[in-house]
Amino acid sequence: MSYEKATQLIALTLWAILAGCGSAGYQSPPDAVTSDLVDGPSNLTVRVVGLDSSSGELALALYDSAEAFAARRDPVAKARLPIEDKEMTWRVDALTPGRYAVAAYHDADSDGELDRAITGWPTESYGFSNDARSMAGPPGFKAAAFNLVAGDNQIEISVR
């Protein structure tokens, strides 16, 4: 591939990523939390499937707002679990009922970061609640958010 073609490909990829980031900034208001969601504490079990090896760690973060989810900051809960199997489970107890979203990735080399190619695309497996995906960049909170009701709740995330 020529230098000019490679430069065009990188520029196009960066444009697609930036276009996705711009649209991710706009979030419609979250759905109203109904009264049946708030009668007591909530527990969440996250089952992660699709791990392609037992090396490294599974990094997970639970968010309760579009702002925190978009910035990947201030999660309500987070964990780094040594991978023991191709399916892993993470439990978070005593949460307030409401709307949440989970982000997860397989940190295969345990370096604490989601590794990326020169184009910016992740080279390690990742996933979000609702198996939310986006054509450019991570999905928005609205796509990944789910209602956490009082009592026990379970979700599944497929990492790819």
Image (spheres, rainbow, N blue to C red):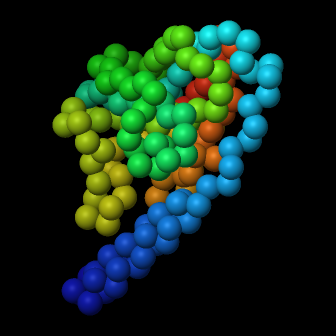
Q: From the viewer's perspective, is residue 54 above or below residue 145?
A: above
Q: Is the N terminus in the top left, top right, bottom left or bottom right quadrant?
A: bottom left
Rendering quarter of residue 112 = top left
Residue at (48, 43) in percent of width and height: 69
Residue at (39, 26) in percent of width and height: 78
- Whether residue 27 sits left or right of residue 34 in the image: it is left
Q: Nearer the viewer, residue 50 or 113?
A: 113
- Whether residue 95 sits left or right of residue 61 in the image: it is right
Q: Nearer the viewer, residue 17 or 10?
A: 17
Image x and y of residue 15, in percent = 42, 76
Q: From the viewer's perspective, is residue 25 above or below residue 8?
A: above
Q: From the viewer's perspective, is residue 15 above or below residue 36?
A: below
Image x and y of residue 31, in percent = 74, 41
Q: Nearer the viewer, residue 28 or 142?
A: 28
Image x and y of residue 71, in percent = 41, 49
Residue at (63, 47) in percent of width and height: 143
Image x and y of residue 48, in percent = 49, 26
Residue at (49, 15) in percent of width and height: 92
Rendering quarter of residue 40 = top right
- Is residue 29 in sight in this rendering? yes
Q: From the viewer's perspective, is residue 118 above or below residue 7?
A: above
- Is residue 127 in sight in this rendering? no
